[in-house]
Image: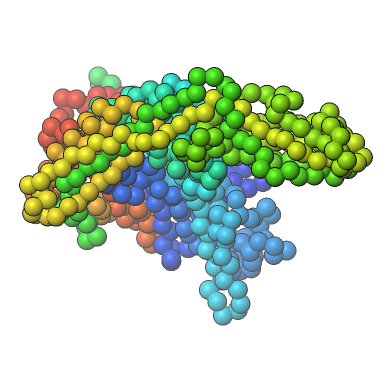
Amino acid sequence: MASLFDDINFEVYISGAWLDITADVQVSPAPKWNRGIMGNGQLDRVGSPGYLSFSLDNSQYNSASTLGYYSPGNPSALAGWTSGLPVRLSFVFEGETYYKFYGRIKPDGIKVYPGIKESRRVDVTAHDYMSQAQGHELKLLTLEENKRIDEVVPSIISSMPIAPLATDYDIGAYTFPTVFDTVRSATTATAEFQKLANSELGYIYVSGDRTGGETLKVDGNLTRQIAITTIPTVGDGFLLKEDAGFLLKEDGGKLLLNETQAASFTDSELYPGTEIGFGGYLVNRVEVSTYPRRVDAAATTVLFTLQTEFSLGASETRLNYFGRYRDPSGGASYVNGRDMVVPTTDDFLAETTAGVDATTDITLTATYGTEGVSYNFVNNVAAERIVKTLRARGKGIYIYDAVKIVYDSTDSQLIHGLLGLSVDMKYQDDPTVGEFFANTVLTQSEVPALSVDRAAVFANRNSMTIYGFLALEPGTKIGFTETVTGINNEFFIQGYDAEITDGLHVWWKPILQNALLSTGPWTWDVSTWDIGTIWAPG
C-alpha cells in the first residue's frame, strides 16, 4: 500500500506572517517544481533557476468563500496579495517537517483567469534564488586577492538585494590570486558563479532543508569525493526500556528510534519516465584554458579617460556617471583595475563657459570597482560649468592570452569523430590544474557510457522512497542499481523535477551524475546504523 505524508503545506509570507493556503491549492493542474542543477554533464556545475507552479481556487467556494480572493487589485482580494511574496512548500512525515522549495512569486507570476465561463482559478509561479541570481548584474565589485571559492561567493551574495535564507560553504581546494578581474558591465551573479565553479571544479546550487527550504551550497573540488549520505531506516520504531516498556518524553510522547541506512535505489523503485542514455556525454577532445595575470607595478596607469567634455547645469547634481576601464596600450580592449587613486587636480578639470578654471566649484566623488569607476558630480554654483578632463589611475590587471591544454583520444576520434569539450577556468592561473582536469575527463569519457538523466520514482511507494524523496537533496550521494541496463554504481543527485498528483502523491525525477573516483556500488551495512544519528547531506 502506498504511504502518505502527514501533511503537504503551501504557505505564503504575507502581512508579516506565514499563511497556510493549502486548502485552496487545486489538484489540477498538478503543482510542480524543480530544484538544483538540471543537467549531469561535466560542465553542469551551477544551479539552474528553480520554479514552483500551482493553482489556487479563486471562486466563491474557496476557503474564504470569496470570489476574486486571489485577484490582485480586486477589492475583495486577500490583503497584501501581490507578486514578490515569499512562498514555501513543505512535507511532514512521521512528525518531521522537510522544506522542499522556497522562493518568491515572480513579477509576472500571478495569472488570473477572468470571466464567468473561465475556470475561476489563479495560476501562481514562484522562482528561487538561482533565478534571481541569473538576472542580477554585478556592479563595482572590489578586486579580491588570494581567495577560495567559499570566500568569494559571500561577496557576490552581499552585492545582491536579497540573501538566501541559509548558506553552506565547503572549503575550496584552490586559492585564486585575483578574483572579479574578469567582471564586465553586464556580468551576472550566475555568470560569476559559473567562473568560480569551473575554476574550482566545484558546484554552486540551492537545496531544500529542514529549516526554511533554501540553502545556498558551495561544494569545493574535494567535497563530493568524501561525501556520505544516509536516510532514516524504513519503519523506525521507538526506544524501549529494559522491561520492554516505551521510554517516554516529559509530555508522554514516545522517543523515535532514528537509525540510518545508506541511500540506495534499485529498478524496483523505478517507474515509466526514467531516462537512461548511452554515449550522450562522450568526449574525445578536452580543451582547458587557464589565465595567468599581469598586474602593473605602480598605480600610475590611466585606465579611464573622458573622451568628450560635457556640461553641468547651474546647481546640477549628476549621479552614476560610469567609466569603463580600457587598456591604454590597446593590447586588451578592456582591463580591470586595482589600487585606484583618489582623483587629484591632474585627473579632474572643470571650467566656466569662458574657459576659466572652475574645478573647485564642482564636488567630485569617485567609487571604484574592479571593472570601472562611477562618478557623482555636484555643481555648487548657480552657473553652468564644463567638465574638461576626467581620468582614473591605478594598477591595470591584464589577461591577454589563455594557456590552453588540449588532450585528444585519437582512437575514439577514429570511431566517433571529433567530440570536444571546452572548459574556461577564468580564475585559475595554474595550468597544471587544467591539465589534470583534461586528462581525468578524457580518461572517463572517451568511450560511450551509460548516464541516468532522469530516475522516475513514485515517492509514496513505501517509507524508504518517501524518506529518499524528503532527505535526498541536490548534492547528496546515492547508490543506484538497474538490472536491464546493468548499472550498479554511485551517483550524486544534481537536481530534480517533482509534481504532486491528486493532492497526495509525489512523482520525483532526480537527475544523477556519475560519482567521480567511484569504487563500486553501495551496500546497506547494518553494522553502521547508529541510534540517534540523523540524516545530513554530504
How many marks overall? 0
In the rendered view, does 529 fall on the left or right side of 70?
A: left
Looking at the rendering, in which quadrant would you find the N terminus? bottom left
Can residue 442 be spotted in the picture?
Answer: yes
Please name whichever residue, 100 or 328, is drawn nearer the observer in this view of the structure: 328
The residue positioned farthest toward the bottom in the image shown? 117
The image position of residue 386, as x and y in percent, is 81, 41
The residue positioned farthest toward the front in the image shown? 355
The image position of residue 494, as x and y in percent, is 31, 44
The image position of residue 431, as x and y in percent, is 28, 29
Q: What residue is shown at x 36% (from left), y 54% (from top)? A: 498
Q: What residue is shown at x 55% (from left), y 76% (from top)? A: 118
Can residue 25 be spotted in the picture?
Answer: no
Q: What residue is shown at x 86% (from left), y 42% (from top)? A: 353
Please name whichever residue, 145 or 206, is drawn nearer the observer in this view of the structure: 145
Please name whichever residue, 396 or 210, is drawn nearer the observer in this view of the structure: 396
Asked if residue 70 is positioned above or below residue 179 in the image, the reply reads: below
The image position of residue 200, as x and y in percent, is 34, 31
In the rendered view, does 53 fall on the left or right side of 433?
A: right
Please name whichever residue, 158 or 290, is drawn nearer the observer in this view of the structure: 290
Asked if residue 69 is positioned above or below residue 332 in the image, the reply reads: below
